[in-house]
């Protein structure tokens, strides 16, 4: 008994070592190594929850071919009847082995439908990866922009706090200084609230980035993309090829699915023929007779010709055809809109002056105010303009990035582009 237990322990131990020796390296390989911004994007394309779910759905739907190609099992139909006839005991039996023949091409129609469903799942996965890429890129750029806006808000808050501290050190304030003090207190609170709002947005985006990469944000914080100064030239027109544009490809897949549904509905109007050999016995007390033959069973297509399902499939085909036409038009119009957004944003950024507000100029304004050379309203307005300029410039940059990557998605080149 002890010897058996010892063998069982050794077997369990070696099995565990082999299991973890194989599985642990595989698990370790799933961790992303972050060395630059592109690594974050590549990691998100593999770890994003929506992409993982879509990949699992595509893997699941890959089994649809096996489901559709299954054939019905043969049926064994038997009947035994016994009784008495005068002084004889009567025992009759009939046994048929029936094989179902699916008429009308049912199996072929199911396989065609399964192929289209598999293609649709693959397109859904590609669409989720495109959406994940856009979401990740916008998140990375926005996190870097929030840093700049937080710097402006913190600088303004600290400046007004410093000015208010100087007011407190004065034994007496003039009416004008008293009004300035109230104005500075209000604007300081305004920037405190702006700073809080930015930090809340930053925390939400950091959480999102950790969710879609499964990596702590601190490991990615130093790899945020810099301000984009070089913008690629967007192409005016691109052909709406189904192999590159996911929206049009999905619409074509829906059209093919509708066609396969029509063929499947038509095939179901045909009855299934069950046919096979039969064996019968007729036994009396004194003797038994044997006989064989061929049996078959087929429903009569008199009451049900599957007209309802065929009508639905034909209406679905009309919808799919219309949906394809609308998708082509919407894609073309959507590309024109994104191209216009992109060019306007790039033009606005190229015409702006990022160096319009220097630190030395900011210090000069504070110095002038302390000497009584400029009013408090000018100091407040200068900081407000600095913050609004930074915010507006970031908005235009994010608009340009959003439009550019949407153009990549429409043209089907998003996975070839680098952040």
Image (cartoon, grey):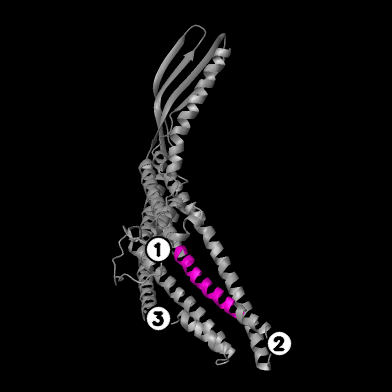
State if disc 1 and disc 2 touch (CB < 8 Å). Answer: no
**Is residue 180 toward the left or the right of residue 153 in the image?**
right
Q: Is residue 49 magenta?
A: no
Q: Nearer the viewer, mark 2 or mark 1?
A: 2
The disc, 2 or 1, on the residue closer to the chain's N-terminal end is 2
In the picture, which quadrant includes the C terminus? bottom left
Query: What is the number of the mark on residue 323?
Result: 1
Give residue 409's position: percent from left, percent from top. 37, 63
The disc, 3 or 2, on the residue closer to the chain's N-terminal end is 2
Residue at 54% of width from left, 84% of height from top? 366
Give residue 126's position: percent from left, percent from top. 39, 55
Residue at 43% of width from left, 75% of height from top? 396
Q: Secondary structure at mark 2?
A: loop
Asked if residue 301 shows in the view, the reply is no
The disc, 3 or 1, on the residue closer to the chain's N-terminal end is 1
Task: Say above or below: 198 vs 358.
Answer: above
Question: Which of 267 and 223 lies nearest the eye of the viewer?
Answer: 223
Q: Nearer the viewer, mark 3 or mark 2?
A: 2
Q: Is residue 144 magenta?
A: yes
Say few, some or many: other residues with alpha carbon within 10 Å of mark 1 (under 14 / 14 to 19 / 20 or more): some
Residue at 51% of width from left, 78% of height from top? 387
Q: Which residue is mark 2?
A: 171
Give residue 5's position: percent from left, percent from top. 56, 17
Question: Which of 374 and 396 lies nearest the eye of the viewer?
Answer: 374
Q: Nearer the viewer, mark 3 or mark 1?
A: 3
Q: Which residues are drawn in magenta? A: 139-160
Question: Which of 113 and 336 lies nearest the eye of the viewer?
Answer: 336
Q: Quadrant of residue 166?
A: bottom right
Whole-Å distance between the Cαs marked 3 and 2?
43 Å
Q: Which residue is mark 3?
A: 353
Say few, some or many: other residues with alpha carbon within 10 Å of mark 3 (under 14 / 14 to 19 / 20 or more): few
């Amino acid at each position: 008994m002890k010897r058996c237990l010892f063998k069982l322990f050794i077997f369990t131990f070696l099995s565990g070592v082999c299991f973890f020796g194989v599985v642990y390296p595989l698990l370790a390989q799933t961790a992303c190594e972050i060395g630059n911004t592109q690594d974050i994007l590549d990691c998100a394309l593999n770890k994003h929850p929506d992409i993982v779910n879509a990949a699992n759905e595509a893997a699941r739907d890959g089994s649809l071919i096996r489901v559709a190609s299954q054939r019905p099992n043969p049926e064994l139909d038997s009947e035994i009847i016994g009784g008495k006839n005068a002084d004889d005991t009567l025992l009759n039996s009939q046994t048929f082995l029936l094989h179902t023949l699916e008429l009308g091409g049912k199996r072929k129609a199911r396989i065609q439908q399964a192929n289209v469903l598999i293609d649709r799942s693959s397109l859904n996965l590609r669409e989720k990866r495109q959406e994940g890429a856009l979401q990740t890129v916008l998140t990375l750029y926005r996190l870097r922009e929030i840093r700049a806006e937080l710097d402006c808000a913190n600088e303004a808050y600290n400046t007004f706090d410093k000015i208010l501290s100087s007011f407190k050190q004065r034994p007496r304030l003039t009416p004008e200084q008293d009004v300035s003090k109230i104005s500075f207190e209000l604007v300081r609170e305004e920037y405190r609230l702006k700073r809080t709002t930015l930090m809340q947005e930053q925390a939400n985006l950091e959480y999102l980035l950790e969710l879609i990469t499964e990596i702590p944000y601190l490991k990615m914080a130093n790899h945020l993309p810099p301000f984009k100064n070089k913008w690629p030239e967007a192409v005016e027109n691109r052909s709406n090829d189904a192999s590159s544009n996911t929206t049009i490809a999905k619409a074509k897949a829906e059209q093919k699915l509708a066609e396969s549904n029509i063929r499947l509905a038509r095939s179901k109007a045909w009855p299934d023929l069950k046919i096979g050999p039969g064996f019968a016995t007729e036994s009396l007390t004194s003797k038994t007779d044997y006989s064989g033959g061929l049996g078959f069973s087929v429903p009569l297509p008199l009451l049900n010709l599957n007209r309802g399902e065929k009508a639905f499939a034909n209406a679905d085909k009309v919808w799919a055809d219309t949906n394809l036409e609308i998708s082509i038009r919407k894609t073309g119009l959507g590309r024109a809109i994104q191209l216009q957004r992109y060019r306007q944003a790039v033009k606005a950024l190229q015409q702006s002056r990022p160096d319009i507000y220097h630190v030395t100029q900011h210090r000069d304004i504070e110095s002038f105010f302390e000497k009584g050379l400029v009013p408090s309203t000018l100091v407040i307005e200068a900081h407000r303009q600095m913050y609004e300029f930074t915010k507006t410039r970031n908005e235009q940059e994010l608009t340009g990035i959003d439009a550019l990557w949407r153009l990549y998605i429409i043209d089907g080149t998003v996975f070839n582009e680098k952040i």
